[in-house]
Amino acid sequence: MTAPMSPQDTWKQRAGSAAAELIEEGMVVGLGTGSTAAYLVQALAQRIQQGLQIKGAVASSLATYELANNLNIPMTDLDDHPELDIYIDGADEIDPQLRLIKGAGGALLREKILASAARRFVVIADPSKKVTQLGHRYPLPVEIIPLAKTPISLQISRLGAQVQIRQNNNIPFITDNHNYILDCTFPQGISDPVQLDAQLHNIVGVVETGLFIHMVSQIIIGGPEGVQVFPQ
Ligand SMILES: O=C[C@H](O)[C@H](O)[C@H](O)COP(=O)(O)O
């Protein structure tokens, strides 16, 4: 017997299913990573089973590739399709200006590559992801070259963060790109995400940050009343 879904999972599923309805015949689709994106993948697989034909889907992680491929979604890559019609993904935090923190699942680099290759980036989430300021609830993930973990941690701590190397069973978590993630907690929140992103990118050995700024086209929030779309 399957356990009943929590309200939060139901809301994530609503957002994922609503986003799957945006996918049209012949599109190249980018698929995000995480629990909300997994509902999108399931809903897209169902639409394909019912007859929708897409050119192909590009996955933002090995986990999403496996899930989508197992559900018979036709998969492709950025070499065959360097431009995506739509990229749909979850987020960890969403501020009022539609700026995001992403990367709690460790997939931020590929996610940002797909978001930047997409004509339209749609974020799907439950209401808990909305924040007034980024950085209050989640640490900011920063993907780095492993060799440089100590000097990079030092430089990020000088920007006011408490820095931790993400661990998995007491060893560093390794991303799909064979890098490490530094989880950076800013105790006062992130007052200027644009400036912080530039400062982090200036540090040699930083590969990418989990700040997604000026990238989002639309947000779909699933909640108790159904879904809300911003901007409409
Ligand atoms: O690396 C992970 C991604 O950025 C996810 O999209 C993000 O963590 C949201 O995941 P979830 O939908 O599971 O909350």
Image (cartoon, rainbow, N blue to C red):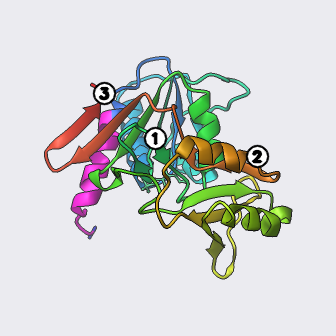
Q: Mark 3 points at which residue?
A: 231
Number of the front mark, 3 or 1: 1
* Residue in the foreground of this view, choosing between 49 and 93: 93
Q: Which of marks 3 and 2 is nearer the N terminus?
A: 2
On the rendered image, what quadrant is the C terminus found in?
A: top left
Label 2 sits on a secondary structure element that is loop
- The residue at 53%/21% (across/down) is 119
Q: Mark 2 points at which residue?
A: 202
CA gap, disc 2 to disc 1? Answer: 20 Å
Sequence-wise first label, 2 or 1? 1
Residue 56 vertical placement versus 125 (above, below): above
Q: How many marks?
A: 3
Q: Crowding at label 2, few (<14), some or many (≥20) Cα neighbours within 10 Å?
A: few
Query: Magenta-highlighted stretch: main secondary structure?
Result: helix
Q: Which amino acid does label 1 sit on?
A: Arg
The question of residue 10 being in magenta is answered with yes
* Residue 108 in picture, x, y percent from top left: 60, 49
Q: Residue 99 carries which label?
A: 1
Q: Residue 222, how many percent across, how many down?
A: 26, 45
The residue at the far bottom in this view is 170
What segment is highlighted magenta in the picture? 3-18
Give the residue type at disc 3.
Pro
Residue 173 to residue 102: above or below: below
Return the x and y of residue 72 as percentages of the image width and height. Answer: 51, 40
Q: Distance between the residues labelled 3 and 1?
A: 13 Å
- Residue 211 visible in the snapshot: yes
